[in-house]
Image: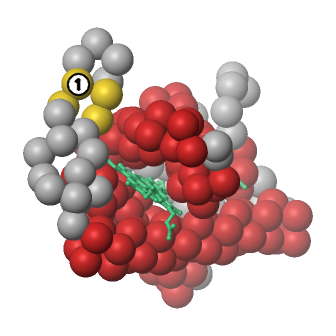
């Protein structure tokens, strides 16, 4: 029988990365609301989440390129196929771009990063005229990612509850 679900690896990575993005986004927005002594640890944890997103997304793309995703429902029009493909490519682009812009944003603040078992010391001087605009670009790109992800969720819910084509089960977690 032809599979109609993404593989277990794709589904696990989809949900893990979605959860990490949500956590990184909320921490990024609230970092300045934490008491001052906690800010460096929050920025560090935020950065670790973002670096994990880069690594997991590279694994995910490697898996995606070597494993055929399930066919879309036969009734899907050519236009919708193209639109969903484009939206997914844009999501992947932003999932990688946002944390990649985060790296110089961190370094130009004169910060290093603590992985627990080892540390990367600060390697650039704190340069506000560079890190301020970089933080803005990083933040705007993060908003674009979250906005696109919300559109993606809306499209999924439209399929599930209006078109009633059970699209969500293609990416659903857990055994059938
Ligand atoms: C930060 C949040 C999210 C991001 C970044 C994200 C990203 C992606 C990407 C890149 C794909 C394409 C998979 C591929 O073909 O390689 C995908 C597929 C999918 N996502 Fe999400 N997703 C998010 C949240 C959600 C949520 C909350 C839902 C449920 C409402 C959902 C439902 C789906 C479904 C059903 C598919 C499969 C679409 C198809 O049938 O081809 N996603 N997602
Ligand atoms: C998908 C992953 C990520 C998301 C969604 C995200 C999101 C955000 C958001 C929304 C902000 C607030 C921006 C503003 O105040 O205008 C922020 C700040 C920041 N992010 Fe990220 N980020 C991610 C990954 C990373 C990574 C990988 C790093 C570094 C390695 C990083 C470093 C920073 C730094 C240094 C700040 C400034 C914190 C401060 O105000 O002190 N981010 N991020």
Q: Quadrant of ligand 2?
A: bottom left
Looking at the rendered image, the quarter that the N terminus falls into is top right
Left or right: 69, with 109 as reference point? right
Q: Residue furthest bottom?
A: 79
The percent position of residue 156, horizontal first and vertical second, equals: 71, 63
Which residue position holds label 1?
Answer: 119
**Would residue 171 be visible to someone looking at this image?**
no
The percent position of residue 84, horizontal first and vertical second, equals: 52, 73
Rendered position, 8 above or below 157: above
Residue at point 28% right, 13% down?
Answer: 117
Q: Residue furthest left?
A: 123
For residue 99, what is the image quadrant? bottom left
Looking at the rendered image, the quarter that the C terminus falls into is top right
Q: Nearer the viewer, residue 176 or 141?
A: 141
Residue at point 23% right, 25% down?
Answer: 119
Count of marks, rendered view: 1
Q: Which element carries disc 1, helix, strand or loop?
A: strand
Figure coloring: secondary structure
Q: Nearer the viewer, residue 105 or 78?
A: 105
Rendered position, 32 above or below 82: above
Left or right: 31, with 160 as reference point? left
Q: Residue furthest top?
A: 117
The percent position of residue 111, horizontal first and vertical second, equals: 27, 45
The percent position of residue 118, horizontal first and vertical second, equals: 23, 18
For residue 35, what is the image quadrant? top right
Residue at point 22% right, 58% down?
Answer: 126
């Amino acid at each position: 029988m032809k599979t109609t679900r993404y593989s277990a690896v794709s589904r696990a990575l989809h949900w893990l990365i979605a959860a990490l993005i949500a956590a990184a986004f909320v921490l990024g927005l609230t970092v300045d609301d934490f008491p001052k002594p906690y800010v460096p640890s929050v920025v560090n944890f935020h950065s670790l989440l973002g670096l994990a997103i880069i690594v997991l997304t590279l694994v995910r793309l490697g898996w995606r390129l070597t494993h055929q995703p399930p066919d879309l429902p036969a009734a899907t029009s050519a236009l919708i196929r193209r639109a969903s493909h484009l939206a997914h490519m844009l999501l992947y682009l932003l999932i990688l771009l946002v944390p990649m812009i985060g790296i110089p944003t961190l370094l130009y603040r004169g910060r290093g990063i603590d992985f627990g078992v080892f540390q990367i010391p600060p390697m650039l001087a704190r340069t506000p005229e560079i890190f301020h605009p970089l933080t803005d670009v990083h933040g705007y790109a993060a908003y674009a990612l979250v906005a696109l992800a919300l559109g993606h969720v809306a499209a999924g819910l439209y399929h599930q509850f209006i078109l009633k084509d059970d699209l969500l089960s293609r990416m659903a977690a857990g055994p059938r």
